Structures are given as structure tokens and as C-alpha cells.
Amino acid sequence: MRDFLLLLADNTQILGHRLGEWCGHGPELEIDMAMTNLALDLVGQSRNYYQYLAELEGKGRTEDDLAYLRDAREFRNCLLVEQPNGDFARTVARNFLFDSWHFFFLQALCNSNDERLAAIAAKSLKEVTYHLRWSSEWVIRLGDGTEESHRRIQDAFDHLWTYRGELLTPAPFETEAASAGYGVDLHSIKPLTEDKLADILYQATLRRPEDGWMQSGGKTGRHSEHLGYLLAEMQYVQRAYPNSVW
Amino acid sequence: MSTQVSLEERFQARIDAEQKIEPKDWMPEAYRKTLIRQISQHAHSEVVGMLPEGNWITRAPSLRRKVALLAKVQDEAGHGLYLYSAAETLGISREELYNELLSGKAKYSSIFNYPTLTWADMGAVGWLVDGAAIMNQVALCKCSYGPYARAMVRVCKEESFHQRQGFEILLTLSKGTPEQRAMCQDAINRWWWPSMMMFGPNDSDSPHSAQSMRWKIKRYSNDTLRQKFVDMAAEQIRVLNMTLPDPDLRWNEERGHYDFGPIDWNEFNEVLKGNGPCNRERLAARRKAWEEGAWVREAAMAHAAKRQQQSVQSH
């Protein structure tokens, strides 16, 4: 249960953090506000998971201890979400790849035999329905916009494709979670995310990249170099002034 | 000529009778220009103001603070939007206004040209900068121009929430470790005088004030609002158990107000001229976001045009 909860918490925390980096720097005010909304939702979702885990542990740790006082090797998020924002196309592609998995994952998680998890999933699903719509619409707009935007979003998908496999490949703790009934069988959601992907890429006039070698390791704590820098920034105040209340 | 005079007289009579002026009403060109200048400066201030606080989003020290700060900076973007819309009712486009900001022609509040150096700055900015802004904005809720006054009502509700949030950040630090207390005092020291300058020059040196007061765009003088701000802060600082960096600050029984020391207008003028610590960085950040977003905005328009064409063809 611990690793499974950390996977959910860290995925949403790290992606929310990345989206927060855009705040104040978006291509226009409305987009800036929309990305901040996504960040707010995701960080909010991560807090629900961290809080639940802290309660289950019963060691007096808090959500902040879990977010700020673990090192990169203990983070369980997928490699995809820690990838840098890049240009707006890279951010949109990263979010769409995540959302088109996250949405179906949460739908399935609503049937978890763990009531608390099912409740968090149901609440998150409302938000993620909007996230998926937002990123889908932007994939279509950029794909079927100008030559430049088409090239940029296609490049973004080509670049990020290698991180997609990990979303759908269960780590041992996920397999265990699925068979115990509180997790999600990733094989069952695979066709749904594939259909969504195919539909949106088609509408966006984009080419589906070849399924080559897929990177993995995030779920077991073997991350890209990017995560260390992200955490150095995110955890700095907590680490520099230990045992303080903020 | 006589019609013009009577139009102006009628306009002033409506203002004197506390009636709101609406976008389609006749108004003197100078009134329109003054409002465009003021509302757009205000909008630009919101949008530039996202940067010093955005600076701490990725380093917010707890998840609760991170969420609150994200929401706050997002509110500022929202305020920018309401204000650009209010300015647009006066017959100028957001793009034109934005270009004036990026070219350096339009001004924004100088306060945002100061750096946010520690987490405590998020508290000090909320308490002092938002606190000073509210003094001005509450007054603007009664401004004679309807769309501006109404935008301000919404803005004020959110701003007063931000100010309480800022104070609460400082309060938490003031009860914390010695390092946190030092951080808190240091932030107050750095933000106090720049916040005092937010009210603008002394009344005797304020060129636009008299006409704006007559038009009821401005309801209180700079010095009146500044005094109100000092009176508020001088009381609240005691709750924090910190000090304001002004040796001359003391209660004046006779006036019923706090006295305070002289403001360094030389610094104010230098920041206004572009020599503040962050003037260049702030403008550069706004330009970078705008230029790097150009292809995104073009793509959105191109796509919308394609969609429109498709729907025309299918009908």
C-alpha cells in the first residue's frame, strides 16, 4: 500500500510542481491561469494521498515530511512527470500523455476496495476530466494550427514517447495492489487510453510515434537527473531550517 | 463651443451627484485618457506583480503554503484580466495596452521592482504591499467610472484575503525559531519604505491629483491614504512583536495619528526611472513570456479560423 500511495502522491505532486513553474510565465494570461488551476488540482490531490499515507503509517509524520524530507531515490513517480517543461508544446504533450492515462486510471480506482482511495479517486476524477479536456484541446489546436505549432507538438510527442511505456507497465507493488483489490489492473485500462490517444492524435493531424525502447525506473526510485534539481529547489527551505513550523 | 461647455458641465454635474459614468456615456477626452492610463497601469501592476511572488512558488516551505501561493498569484492574473477588460471599455485593446507595457512606455507599480529574497517576503508582501494596495483600491470602489469601480469591488474582496494570508505567514514566523524571527524582521525592514512609497508623492508634489479628485476618480489624497496605512501597520506590528524600521514613528495624541519619518523620494524617483533592483528583470520576464508565447497564440487563432471555415462549409 505504501509504495502504491507514494506513486499516486508523487506523480501528482511532481507534475503539479512542474506546472507551478509556469505560473506568471504563460503564453497569455488565460493560459497562465489554466495551468495554475491544473497545478492547484494536482498538488491538492497529492496532499490527499500523502495525508492518507501519513495516517496509515501512524508514526506522526505529516504530508510535508513525506513531500519535503525524502530523497530522490525514495520518490515513486513516473519519469514522464519530472521531465522539464520545455516549450508550451512539450508541456502540453507531457500533460496529455499523463492525463489520457490518469483519467482512465482514476476511473478504475473509483472501484477500489479501499474506501478512502475510492473516495479520493472520485474527487480527483472530476478535476482530471477537465485536465484531459484541456490538454486534448491544446494538442488539437497546436497539431492543427500553424506549421510551426504542428512541428513543435510533433517533436514534443516524439521526444516524450519513450516515457509513455512506464505508465502502463506495472511495478511489482502495482501488481500486488491490483490483485489485492485496492489498485488498478493496468492491462484493463490500456485499450481505453490507446483509443483516446489515437482519436486525439488523429484530430490533431499528428503522427503516432513508433513504440521503440521505453524508459522506466521512476516507480522504483531510479529517476532521471531532472528530479534531483526539482527536489533541491522544492525542499530547500524545509531542509535549510529543520524542525520549523511554516 | 457652447454645446461642448454644456456637455462638460452636465458631465461634471453627474459626477457631483455621485452618478456612475458608463462606457457609452459622453466623457471629456482627458477623463478617458486619465482612466486608460490609470486602469492600464493598475492592470500591468497585477501582471508584473505575479513575478516577485511567483518567484517563491517552487520553494514554498509546505504544501499548504504552496497551494495558497499558487492561488494568490492566479488571483493576480485574474485581477489583470478584469482590469484590462475595464480599460477596453474605454476604446483601447488589451494588445495595445500590453505593447505599451512591453515597450517600457506604460508604467506599473514600482514596488514590484524590488526582489523577494526569503520566504518571509511572501508574508511581508502580503501584509504591507497588499495592505497598501487595499487602501487605494477600497477608495477606487467608489470611483466615478462604473466598470473600474465594479472591477475594484471584486479585486478588494480577494486582496483583503491576501493581506490576511500575508499577515498570517509573518505571524507564524514571528512565533518560530530565532532564524525565522530574524527572517521576519528583515523582510519587514526591506518592504516598509517601498510600501510607504506606493501611495505616490506627497500631495504638494502630486501633479494629477486635483483634476482626478474633481472627477472622483481619486477620492482621497496620497497623504491621507498613507497616514491610514501607517496607523494600521503601527498597531498590527505589535501583534507580530516586531518593529517598523522608522525611529520617528510614534503616536501623536493631538493629531490622533502616528507620526512617521521622512520618505527617501530620491530612491522612489530612481526606481521610477528604471533603476530599481529588478526593473530590467521584470520587464525582460514579461517580454520573454510574450515573445515565446507568440507561436501559441498564432496557432490558436489559425486553428479557430480553420474550425470556423469547416462549420461554414458544412452548413
Image (cartoon, grey):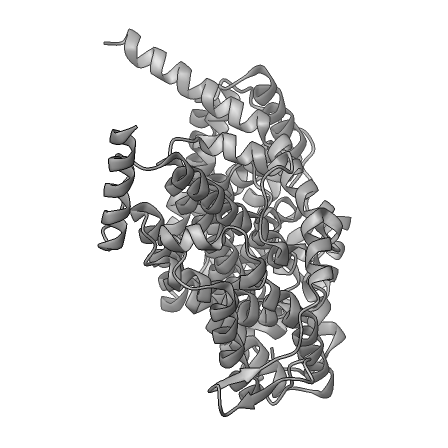
In the picture shown, does residue B123 fall above or below B181?
Answer: above
Q: Given the current orientation, which residue lies at the most extreme front position?
A: B2
Residue A96, horizontal then vertical, whole percent: 51, 37
Q: Given the current orientation, which residue lies at the most extreme top position?
A: B313
Closer to us: B194 or A120: B194
Q: Quadrant of the C terminus of chain A?
A: bottom right
Residue A38, horizontal then vertical, whole percent: 48, 49
Closer to us: A63 or B190: B190
Which residue is pictured at 77% across the width and 49% down the height? A225
In the picture shown, does residue A23 fall above or below B263?
Answer: above
> Which image quadrant is residue B3 in?
top left
Residue A161, horizontal then vertical, whole percent: 63, 33
Horizontally, residue B297 falls left or right of residue B16, namely: right
Which residue is pictured at 47% across the width and 67% down the height? B162
Which residue is pictured at 53% across the width and 45% down the height? B44
In the picture shown, does residue B102 fall above or below B268?
Answer: above
Horizontally, residue A120 falls left or right of residue B187, namely: left
Horizontally, residue A2 falls left or right of residue B213, namely: right
- The answer, for residue B25, to whether it is visible in the render is no
- The answer, for residue A72, to whether it is visible in the render is yes
